[in-house]
Image (spheres, grey):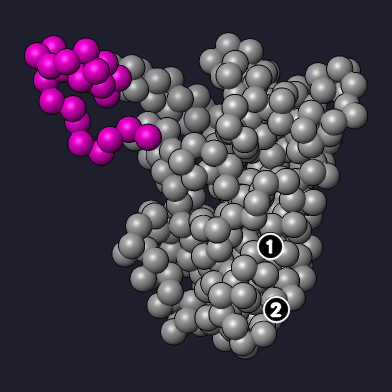
Amino acid sequence: MTAAVPPAAGWLGTPESRRAFRRYWITEPLDGLWKAALHHSMRLMPIAVCSALGAPLGRLFGRTVYRGMDARARRNYLRLRPGASPEQLERAMQAMWNNLGRTMTELSAIERLWTSGRVAVTGAEQLLAAQRAQRPFIVACLHLANWELTGIGLASLGLECCSVFEPTGSRFDVRLMTAARERLTKRHHIYPPGKATAHAIYDAVVHRRQGLHIHIDELLKGRVNAPSLGRPPPLRGNIVNAVRLALAADALLIPAYAERVGDRARFKLVYEAPFALVRSGDKRTDIRTNVERLDAHIDALIRERPEQWRLLGERILDD
């Protein structure tokens, strides 16, 4: 992620500072210019066209810009599906890059996806009932298919909730994504990560009895923290925070994910039944036990559709 503060005069410093200067003032503005032009042009296009443009772009970037990510995704896919044939692997990689490319270009039409009848929702009634009863809820989401839909669904249903947004990419990427989200999230408060956010979220969920939208599959220090995928269960991160907060607030913990239906802009959006939390009275044991159970649950969800998982191309083990 690009530093918020512009680098000092790079031509007078070290090679590293010169690279940072060129990246901040030349490379990233040029990259942001073509992305902004494409984004705003696609906002005028039909949804199907906007989405379809992303598939070849995803495959192109996978073969050129993100070759390291493609290689890791192939290794990780074979770990999750050890019996996959070379043909199955190639189909999965094409599906992965198609999905990633479509998800990026669908950002230009994200507010129209919900109203177009392209998203079939399951489980919304339990969230609405929780809000009517002033019962806090934590929607524990996964980066599957178009992962923006879980939060957009909550906002479109008129639910009072908050979420944490981890800025990624350049400052221009962040501006585009933030603007797209803000067009839909009138009652959905989006916070950056940090200590101030942790206090705000605790107050919203515990004291004001509101909802929280949080992705529990995530990267920590450059590696996938959750799900564990055969490694020891995670000891920190969003999955632990979600469980700890749910226990503290007596909140409903609701796993959620989107699934792309075919290679097109149609989706299933699933808000699952509340996860049954173990409450023995021993706080440490309860957190560890529930994290392990939730980790196993999302592990199974991802293994069913690994080609739609945003983190398939990230580091899982030490490679």
Figure check: 25 above or below 150: above
Label 1 is placed on what type of residue? Glu
Depicted 224 relative to depicted 204: above or below: above
Amino acid found under the numbered disc labelled 2: Val
- What percent of the width, then of the height, locates residue 72? 64, 25
Q: Earlier in the sequence, mark 1 or mark 2?
A: 2
Question: How many numbered circles does the render carry?
Answer: 2
Q: Which residue is mark 2?
A: 278
Start and end of the magenta stretch?
A: 1-25
Q: Is residue 13 magenta?
A: yes
Residue at 78%, 51% (x, y): give it: 301
Residue that appears at 63% across and 30% down = 313
Residue 159 belongs to the span the image colors magenta: no
> Can residue 282 be seen at all in this image of the molecule?
yes
How far across and how far down the image is residue 113, in percent?
Answer: 66, 46
Query: Which quadrant of the structure image shows residue 274?
Result: bottom right
Where residue 63 sits in the image (x, y, percent)? Answer: 63, 13
Look at the numbered disc 2 and give the secondary structure of its residue: loop
- Residue beneath label 1, please? 292
Say which of 299 and 318 sits in front.
Answer: 318
Q: Toward the viewer: 170 or 309?
A: 309
Give the residue at x 59% y 55%. Answer: 234
- x, y percent for residue 69: 60, 24
Q: Secondary structure at mark 1?
A: helix
Instruction: Give the side of residue 209 with respect to residue 308, left or right.
Output: left
